[in-house]
Image (spheres, rainbow, N blue to C red):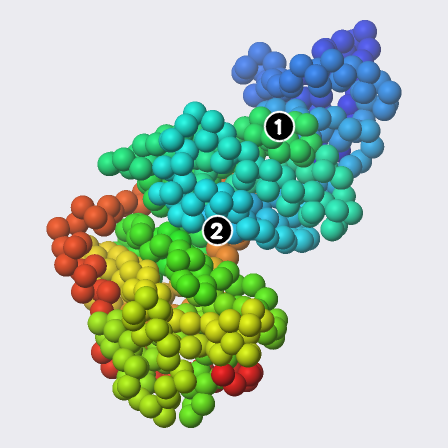
Amino acid sequence: VKRFVVLPTPSRQDDRPDLDRLARALRLDSATSAERLDSVQAEEDATGGEKPLRADWPLLRQLPDRLRQNGFQGTAVLADDRLLDFQPGDTTDQHYGVAVDIGTTTLAAALIHLPTGRELAVRADLNPQTAFGDDVISRISYACQSPGHLEELRGAVISAIDRLIGQLASQVGIARQEIYYLSLVGNTTMQHLACGITPRYLGEVPFTPAVGRSLVGEAAGLGLRIHPAGLVYVAPVIGGYVGGDIVAGMTATGLGRQDRPTLFLDIGTNGEIVLAAGGRLYAAATAAGPAFEGARIRHGMRAAPGAIERIHFDGQWHIRTIGSERPKGICGSGLVDLAAELLRLGLLRPDGRLLRSANPPAAPNDRWTEAKGEPAFIICPAHQTATGEPILLTQRDVRQLQLAAGAIRSGIRLLLRRAGLRAMELQAVWVAGGFRNYIRRRNAQRIGLLPPELPVERIRFVGNTALAGARLFAISQEAQAEAERLARTALHIDLAAEPEFAATFADSMIFPEGEPPSEDEPPSSSKG
């Protein structure tokens, strides 16, 4: 926090040290009533003096001159009982923080005006660690191959975060030195890598994190260029694969205070699930893989301009791309739409097989080709794409989608079973994740990604809850305390150790039978 304070000047009657003088002035300034003034005096009498204020060597060397040059008044920058800076004049309004969500695929950062909590700007970028692997297992493996690899991964993500900080500061027109606080959230592996902590034991049974509670340290120690005494807060984690991003989401949504069965899902490379039921929190992670981020899909891509995000058939095929650009590939929401439509039309069997001749009006011969000897559906012909090549859905792509959706579906089923609930008893399903703004709920139910038997009105998209929670952590100690409580009390379930895991996962890879009614309008866009 920043506080403007006026100190009494030293005299022969009051020759207390400068740091003690400042500490007392701050305490008296916060005591706005006679009762609190008496409380301050009583505490001093009981302890034999003022509560000490700590400061680092560089600031201590400058503090005596700064106080006298500014007439014993100015702005104290504080973190609990630590003095980070003392500035001339009233600079309490020039006080900023940055919240960062370190996603496996995407980095997102928000600049926050700390006195008001107002979000001033948001930026996002690709996590450069994707060059070393598109999932956490790949990165754990790379980090452990050589002593220098961990620092390589750490340096890549820290440099990217530092660039985002610079972009945010430039966008709003402030100096980096006016940023005093960073809050970082991510899955457990991403947080370990950002801090330079070995992730080796996250990749070995029983997948143990090095630290579970929150961390606070100097930003300079991580290589982040903000105020020289600026601090970084790293969120607590629940387990090896349920990390600070999920704790942030739980905090932002108030999941721990729900008195009705509520399911929280973060759909992405790591499909995390938390069930609030009967006064308990059950948390688990699933190996969903990166299909929903567009990875391991032949023509998959992130949700970026040119990505096919919506697909619908009403006698002819309609597609919509992000930014209304010519199609370059297909992102996660488009993949869900396409699979749901193919299932509805009988062109995709529940077991995942593409059927070339099942529905000629919807998919005549010119809609089909082959890839590695297996049928492939032509989503968009070559003459309509930005690349001049057709955009395909291959049989291998369908298998990747089955693995991703099946992992999340099996996780939901196992947590419900652990809590003694049926899916229909869920009163709310909150969905976060990379494509939550684009996905159609009924299509997600049709492929089994969300419980198909659940009334659609119980499903709600809650945005980037990881970043929302990180924002709360930057401005609220109460939110940080709530995060610690949630991380400590949640029951972490290792799904792979559940007796019925293998059978449930295999069964969950089968697309559900039947067709939920559609509640979404078809996309108004180009015909394919």
* Residue name at image x 37 percent, y 77 percent: 369
**Compared to 372, does 82 lie above or below?**
above
* Residue name at image x 49 percent, y 79 percent: 381
> Horizontal placement of 296 versus 220: left or right?
left
Q: Quadrant of residue 204?
A: top left
Q: CA distance from mark 1 to mark 2?
A: 25 Å
**Among all residues in the image, which is located at the extreme front?**
373
| Residue 260 pos. (x, y %) | 31, 62
* Front-lying residue, 100 or 181: 100
* Front-lying residue, 66 or 268: 268
Q: Amino acid at mark 1?
A: Ala
Q: Residues within 10 Å of mark 2 (few under 14, many from 20)?
A: many
Residue 230 shows in the view: yes
| Residue 411 pos. (x, y %) | 26, 57
* Residue name at image x 62 percent, y 43 percent: 98
Q: Residues within 10 Å of mark 1 (few under 14, many from 20)?
A: some
